Each structure stands twice: as C-alpha cells, then as structure tokens.
Image (spheres, grey):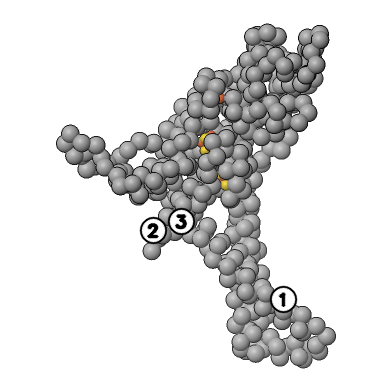
Amino acid sequence: MNTETDSALRLQSPLGRVRGMGSARAGTHHWWMQRVTSIGLLPLTLWFALSAVSLAGASYAEALAWIGSPFNAVLLIATLLLSFHHTNAGLQVVIEDYVHVPGARIAALLAVKAVCGLLAIASVLAVLRIAV
Amino acid sequence: MATFTLPKNSKIGDGKTYAAPSGATNVRSFSIYRWDPDSEATPRRDTYKIDLDNCGPMVLDALIKIKNEIDGSLTFRRSCREGICGSCAMNIDGTNTLACLKPIEDVTGDVKINPLPHLPVVKDLVPDLSQLYAQYRSVEPWLKSDTPPPPDEERRQSKEERAKLDGMWECILCFCCSTACPSYWWNGDRFLGPAVLLAAYRWIADSRDERTGERLDALEDPFRLYRCHTIMNCTNTCPKGLNPAKAIGSIKQMMVERQG
Ligand code: SF4
Ligand code: SF4
Ligand code: FES
C-alpha cells in the first residue's frame, strides 16, 4: 500500500482512488520485450557457455583470436545487449513491485537504466576493440 | 516499501480456550483470529474445542456451532452455505477458501482460521472488501454495445462464442484469489488482481460486447495488469476451480496481438 497516504485521512471514494490517474496505456512493450529477450538468450547463453568451456586452457592469443572472429564477435555483442536489456527489464519489475515511494522509485529506475546502459556500452566497446 | 511484518497494533496474542463438552470423544480444536474494533485490545487467537460427533462436516458448520452454542460474539460472513454466494471466504489451514466447501476432515491437526490476508479487518473474520468492489466496478462489468438488440429478440451467440465464457461466468467474487496473490498484497491499490482481471476478460471475450478495444485500453498499464507475474497462487486457491491466471495470460496476448 502507498506509504504516503496511509496515515492521511482519506475521504475520497474507493472508486475514485481505484480509477486514480487512469491507465498509462503502456507496459505491453516492456512485458513483450522481456519474453523476446529471454527467448533470444536461451540459445545465445548455451552457445556462450559451450564456447567458454571449449576455450578453457587456451592461451591469451587464442582467446583474442576467438573473440576477434566476426561470427563470434557478432554473437557476443548480441548476447551482451540482450543480457543487459533483460537485466534492466527484470530489475525494473522488482523496483516497481517493492519500492512504493514515488521519488525513490523513479530514482532507482533511472539508476538501474544508467548502470545497465553504461555496462552494455563498455562491454560492446571491449569486443569491438578486439574484433575491429 | 512492501511491508513484511505486522504493525505493532496487529500483532496477534493468545486468547481464551473453550474446553470441549465433557464426554466428547471426537474433539477437534479450532484456533480462530479475533479482533474487536470496539475494544482497545490487539488481535488474539481463541481456541474452541468442538465435539465433531455433534457437528456438521464443513468448517462453516463448526463456525456456526461455535456462534450458536459457545460464543455469540464470533463474527463472520455466510449466506448460502453451498459455495455460491462467496460470503464465507477466509483463510483456513493456510489456504484461502470457502468455509462452507471445506471439509473439516481435510485439515490435519488444529483448524487454524484467519480472515482473508492483507485486507483491513472489520471484525474477526470479516475483511473490508470496499477496494475490491470498487475495482470490480471500475472494469464496467456489463454489456456495452452500440448495435441495438434485434427487435423482440435476444442478442444471439453461437455455441462456440458462448463457450468462450465458460470458466469465467462461474466466478462468485469471493476474492480468495486476489487476496492470495503476492502482487496484490504489495500493490493492491493499483494492481487490479486476479478476480477483477478475470471479470474484465469475461467481457472482453464476450462476442456481444463491442467495446473490446476500450476495455483493453483501460487495462494496459504497468500496475493494473502487468503486476501479474504468473505466480499462479490465484489458480491454485480458487475454490471454484477457475483459472484467473489463464484469463490474465489471454489479456496479455491480446495486448501483444493488437500492436501489429
Ligand atoms: S498469476 Fe498473477 S494474478 Fe495470479 S497469483 Fe500470480 S501474480 Fe497474482
Ligand atoms: S476466480 Fe475463484 S477465487 Fe477468484 S473470486 Fe472468482 S471464484 Fe473466487
Ligand atoms: S456461505 Fe455462500 S459461499 Fe460459503
């Protein structure tokens, strides 16, 4: 329940409260992209795990060469982008579920977006520097 | 933040124990949540020992026996005693269900009875349902059609169209499902909850209704609809065997379909 209004006297009708500010007409894209990224991540994560295992014991140069091959670089970048998108979407759900103070909720959502966005850019840049 | 512990004035203490009548051989304890708004006391748990050889088979029978014979102050809702009015919804042995449909035999050990979870309590086992009723009202659960009905005739549906309403018209609005849903506990002021979303889908799926798009618009919201994370508590607890989670899934599917 909303912590801000819990202690205040509320004479607004239940229907008025429930209708509130109306529907946001949003949420479908977020929900759908969560499903799409998780479906995409299934094969990508499997591919990445198998590749990581096959690289066990490889030298630094061999690992660089593996990342540098165009095929691997493309799939790696796809894995990274989908992972960070999925992480961001998942954390957003957790924050919306549990953080009820509006200011704190928006701050937390923006912080998660910033961290996931920067990490995504940094990791893609790392792959590109090796591959290009 | 979501509240995970009870506030101080809701902490439950030990109450009275009422002994079984002498000579009773088939005795069962009923441990019942009690709270009286007219007293300053915090909630308590009273224990009533009942002779099952002298009592009907359902939990509601025991409650009525207690009220009639032992403690007239025990307060609960009931009407039909056959699972059709939805009044007697409460938490029995850790599960939300209808007291009139729950056999005492199905419970092992003491029968623990609480009001539906996470709602304000009016008294004892009677929760305040006004938010849930307002949410039901807010989805406008009635037929909306611009085409007038054919003169001297009802609006017609094929058998297939009518069949789409099965599993939804049977809902008795007992709200066992909504009050079993963690998302409804944390965000019930904005999330509509399974019972109301099932009711909304009942009209979305009705071939005679012409305001499907408007209905979907009103639901398309991160809180009203998308707080549902398919936890399935609703479906598991529904005493009528309905599947609100499936209805919610169908609403989400339509939301995606209409995007393009
Ligand atoms: S499926 Fe959705 S509505 Fe049902 S209990 Fe889970 S979160 Fe709540
Ligand atoms: S779906 Fe089932 S549990 Fe929910 S209100 Fe309807 S009858 Fe009760
Ligand atoms: S008394 Fe009507 S549903 Fe139990």
Chain letter belonging to callout 3: B
Kind of residue at disc 1: Ala
Task: Give the distance between the C-alpha atoms of the residues marked 1 and 2, in whole angstroms.
Answer: 37 Å
Kind of residue at disc 2: Arg
- Residue B4 at least partly seen: yes
- Left or right? Give the position of B183 relative to B141: right
User: Percent x, y for residue B49?
Assistant: 77, 16
Above or below, B209 relative to A41: above
B221 vs B169, nearest the viewer: B169
- Residue B204 at least partly seen: no
Residue shown at the point (70%, 31%) measured from the top left: B106
Query: SS for tag 1?
Result: helix
Q: Earlier in the sequence, mark 3 or mark 2?
A: 3
Task: Give the distance between the C-alpha atoms of the residues marked 3 and 2, in whole angstroms.
Answer: 9 Å
User: Percent x, y for residue B198?
Assistant: 47, 42
User: Percent x, y for residue B142?
Assistant: 35, 35
Mark 1 highlights which residue? A49
Which quadrant holds the C terminus of chain B?
Answer: bottom left
A130 vs A15, nearest the viewer: A15
Q: Disc 3 or disc 2, which is closer to the eye?
A: 3
Kind of residue at disc 3: Gln
Residue shown at the point (43%, 43%) measured from the top left: B166
A83 vs B83, nearest the viewer: B83
Mark 1 and ligand 1: say if the CB distance to the nearest ligand atom is below 8 Å.
no
Mark 3 and ligand 1: say if the CB distance to the nearest ligand atom is below 8 Å.
no
- Left or right? Give the position of B94 relative to B220: right
Q: Which of the 4 image quarters holds residue B184?
A: top right
Judge the density around disc 3: few (<14), some (14-19), many (≥20) Cα neighbours within 10 Å. few
- Left or right? Give the position of B216 relative to B229: left
Chain letter belonging to callout 1: A
Mark 2 highlights which residue? B258
User: Percent x, y for residue A119?
Assistant: 66, 69
